[in-house]
Image: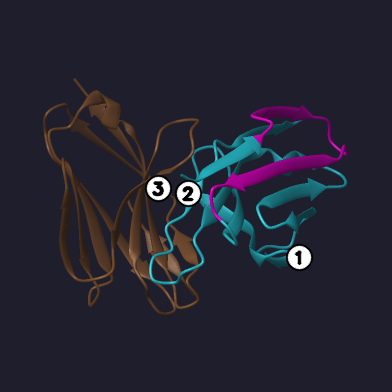
Amino acid sequence: GQNIDQPTEMTATEGAIVQINCTYQTSGFNGLFWYQQHAGEAPTFLSYNVLDGLEEKGRFSSFLSRSKGYSYLLLKELQMKDSASYLCAALDSNYQLIWGAGTKLIIKP
Amino acid sequence: SQTIHQWPATLVQPVGSPLSLECTVEGTSNPNLYWYRQAAGRGLQLLFYSVGIGQISSEVPQNLSASRPQDRQFILSSKKLLLSDSGFYLCAWSPTRLDHNEQFFGPGTRLTVL
């Protein structure tokens, strides 16, 4: 079966760095997405990785290892507004997104 | 630029009543369209997706149905709502090219069935 695993909840301190991990098992693989979702709102796109390595975009970076079925989202210089759920999703061989349950990130002052 | 609309934003319905949620996309043609449901504190559950007018694929058996009467219109319906239908319903679209299937979400409809 197809499966995405990510931690349910994480807590970090304002100004610090946090890494949210995601492992995936899919039928084929065509890329890995990270979305941010604030409470009560729709998800918004953060990043897309299809090749191995690190993609940096401002304070957010995303890493992919295809051989390990592993990705992480790295958030630097955390701000209170970064408190949200972070959803990992893998694109399978049929170009369908398989979604993780999301990681709720709590930022403390 | 592309825009996706969903309405209503919130809805409270009694058990057994019908449902119709509408989603429209502007600024693109022949998009892939999706309906998701998200229970409180949970991930996204894909309900239906469509690659063209009249083409609907269902991911889970349920009392919901979907229709795509026009290229950029996607409708989620039910004849009789159940308590378990409560949740946050999200419509999304993606471009039809396969090399980058990013999905863009509408604002969502929060449905409470009482």
Q: Magenta segment, which residues?
A: B7-28
Q: Which chain is brown?
A: A
Q: Please give the name of the residue rendered at 88% of the width and 39% of the height, measured from the top-left corner.
A: B16
Disc nearer the start of the sequence (1/2):
1
- Callouts 1 and 2 in the same chain: yes
Secondary element at image label 2:
strand
Q: Which residue is mark 3?
A: A102
Residue flagged by tag 1: what amino acid is it?
Gly
A51 left or right of B32 in image: left
Spot occupied by residue A58 in the image (x, y as percentages of width and height): 16, 42
Q: Colour of chain B?
A: cyan
Spot occupied by residue A97 in the image (x, y as percentages of width and height): 47, 63
**Placement of the C terminus of chain B among the 4 image quadrants:** top right
Q: Quadrant of residue B108?
A: top right
Spot occupied by residue B32 in the image (x, y as percentages of width and height): 57, 61
Q: Which residue is mark 2?
A: B104
In the image, residue A48 lies in the stretch drawn in magenta? no
Q: How are the residues colored?
A: by chain
Q: Which label was assigned to residue B54? A: 1
Q: Please give the name of the residue rendered at 73% of the width and 62% of the height, measured from the top-left corner.
A: B61
Chain ID, mark 2: B
